[in-house]
Image (cartoon, rainbow, N blue to C red):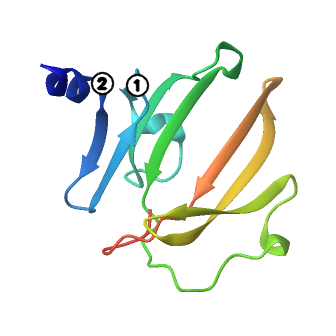
């Protein structure tokens, strides 16, 4: 019974063709990939949900194809646009590049996090 309850609480998104499985925060629901913009077909999945604290607002998670593989070189802060900050995050034992960009749309503050994840077939 407990195992059944745990499985119901876990949400995952996956794509066998592209080779990823991603855990989703509780309560996140699928939204149309067109929401994220970009070239048609590049965004392969999007999900939206509320932050764990009421003051965090809404979150949108998207997976986008890069149509490339990643080399071992890391990004340089000097290569990023203004208002962007380079970070390193740990993923599957690797240090991968992540970018935080603070911006605004229609007067609302928006923070965008981007991470380049090296998968076997192509980066996401």
Label 1's element?
loop
Out of 95 and 18, give the one closest to the viewer. Answer: 95
At 46% from the left and 70% from the top, the residue drawn is 93
Q: Which residue lies furthest to the bottom in this view?
A: 72
Residue 85 percent coordinates (x, y): 80, 58
Q: Are marks 2 and 1 in contact (CB under 8 Å)?
A: yes
At 52% from the left and 40% from the top, the residue drawn is 36
Q: Name the residue under label 2.
A: 9
Residue 47 percent coordinates (x, y): 43, 32
Q: Check the picture and name the quadrant holding the C terminus.
A: bottom left
Q: Name the residue under label 1.
A: 26
**Image side of residue 4 versus residue 18, left or right:** left
First in residue order: circle 2 vs circle 1: 2
Q: How crowded is mark 2: few (under 14 residues within 10 Å), some or many (20 or more)?
A: few
Badge number at residue 82: none
Residue 72 percent coordinates (x, y): 55, 86
Q: Which residue lies furthest to the top in this view?
A: 54
Looking at the image, residue 100 lies above or below residue 26: below
At 79% from the left and 66% from the top, the residue drawn is 80
Label 2's element?
helix
Q: Which residue lies furthest to the left in this view?
A: 1
Out of 93 and 18, give the one closest to the viewer. Answer: 93
- Give the quadrant of residue 115: bottom right
Q: Residues within 10 Å of mark 1 (few under 14, many from 20)?
A: some
- Give the quadrant of residue 10: top left
Looking at the image, residue 122 lies above or below residue 34: below
Q: How far apart are marks 2 and 1 (CA)?
A: 7 Å
Residue 46 percent coordinates (x, y): 42, 38
Q: Check the picture and name the quadrant holding the N terminus.
A: top left
**Image side of residue 73 versus residue 76, left or right:** left
């Amino acid at each position: 019974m407990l195992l059944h309850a745990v499985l119901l609480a876990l949400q995952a998104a996956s794509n066998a063709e592209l080779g990823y499985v991603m855990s989703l925060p509780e309560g996140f629901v699928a939204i149309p990939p067109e929401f994220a913009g970009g070239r048609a077909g590049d965004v392969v999945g999007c999900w939206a949900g509320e932050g764990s604290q009421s003051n965090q607002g809404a979150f949108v998670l998207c997976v986008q194809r890069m149509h490339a593989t990643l080399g071992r070189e890391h990004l340089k802060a000097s290569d990023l646009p203004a208002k962007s900050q380079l970070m390193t995050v740990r993923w599957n034992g690797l240090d991968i590049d992540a970018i935080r960009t603070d911006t605004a749309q229609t007067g609302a503050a928006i923070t965008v996090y981007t991470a380049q994840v090296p998968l076997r077939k192509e980066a996401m």
